[in-house]
Amino acid sequence: MHNKYPSLAAIILIAFAAGIAHSATPDKNSSFTDADYAAHVKELRKKAADDQFTVIVTPPFIVIGDEAPAAVKRRADATVAWAVKKLKDAYFDKDPNEILDIWLFKDKDSYQRNAQRLFDKKPDKPFGYYSGRDHALVMNIATGGGTLVHEIVHPFMAANFPDCPSWLNEGLGSLYEQCGEENGQIHGYTNWRLPGLQEAIRAKKVPSFKALCSTGTNDFYEKDRGTNYAQARYLCYYLQQHDLLKKFYHQFHKNRREDPTGYNTLKSVLARDDMDAFQQDWEQFVLKLRFPE
């Protein structure tokens, strides 16, 4: 990953015990100004005044990390700013409706200890999570940047497609858990969810795409959660590999009132009336995939 995000002509320096943070230029379409970010950082200093954090303004986020300042800057540029730019290029017109904090804790101990101390919550996920209550993405960055990119998708989806069904919200987010850049665009690769999905396909336990698209929020997250995530991810992966993913997203967004589940739009974009036959083709496609690639 690499970053082409512009930097301010006049760099804002923020002393935060262990680090000096550099600000990047807010997007010209953003509703937040340099003054907004400066005020937000001032409040952050009150929250963690005695801690060894480096704080970097990376619109529309604030990145806060307890690794070495150079490492925090590298993650802010190469992961956060890169993902923001590529996701906006592909899908999203609007920034999130508020400035959000991205807390990058250097290891498992720091992640658990600081999440409990700063947010009064013991993490229930090993990699990281998004907290609407705390207006924050909280990460154990030692596990890698994949979960971070996944979680960045969600506030953008909330701002641009608030009624997006869970299957696409999580399918698109999880697609970019393992990602890079190809031909100037963000690109998802196979990941750890693949073997479990292949096993479920062989056991004939994967539901129809009509059933997947029809899942409400509770059903998606509570029933066959692992299969739902994996099926949604690898449907997005299939669409990506056939150069249909961006077309599907934008057409679904346009048709969302008439087609709230996305199923009819999916059929249209695939140009497939017989979705049972498509599912058989998709399953054969998935069974041929490998991770690592």
Image (tube, rainbow, N blue to C red):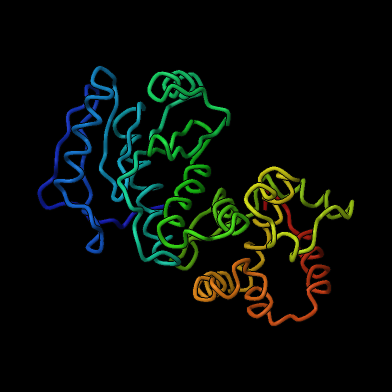
Q: Is residue 108 left or right of residue 88?
A: right
Q: Is residue 261 left or right of residue 211?
A: left
Q: Position of residue 159 (x, y in %)?
A: 40, 57
Q: Is residue 82 left or right of residue 219?
A: left
Q: Position of residue 245 (x, y in %)?
A: 57, 69
16 lies above or below 162: above
Instruction: Judge by depth and name the residue closer to the eye, 212 or 91.
Output: 212
Residue at the farthest left position:
10
Residue at the farthest right position:
203
Instruction: Judge by depth and name the residue closer to the eye, 177 or 48.
Output: 48
Where is residue 263, by image quadrant?
A: bottom right
Give the number of marks: 0
Identify the residue at image location x=41%, y=64%.
Answer: 92
Identify the residue at image location x=22%, y=35%.
Answer: 41
Q: Position of residue 212 (x, y in %)?
A: 72, 59
59 lies above or below 71: below
Q: Is residue 51 left or right of residue 85?
A: left
Where is residue 85, by image quadrant?
A: bottom left
Instruction: Judge by depth and name the residue closer to the eye, 17 or 272.
Output: 272
Identify the residue at image location x=25%, y=17%.
Answer: 50
62 lies above or below 190: above
Where is residue 192, by image quadrant?
A: top right
Q: Position of residue 170 (x, y in %)?
A: 58, 52
Identify the residue at image location x=89%, y=51%.
Answer: 203
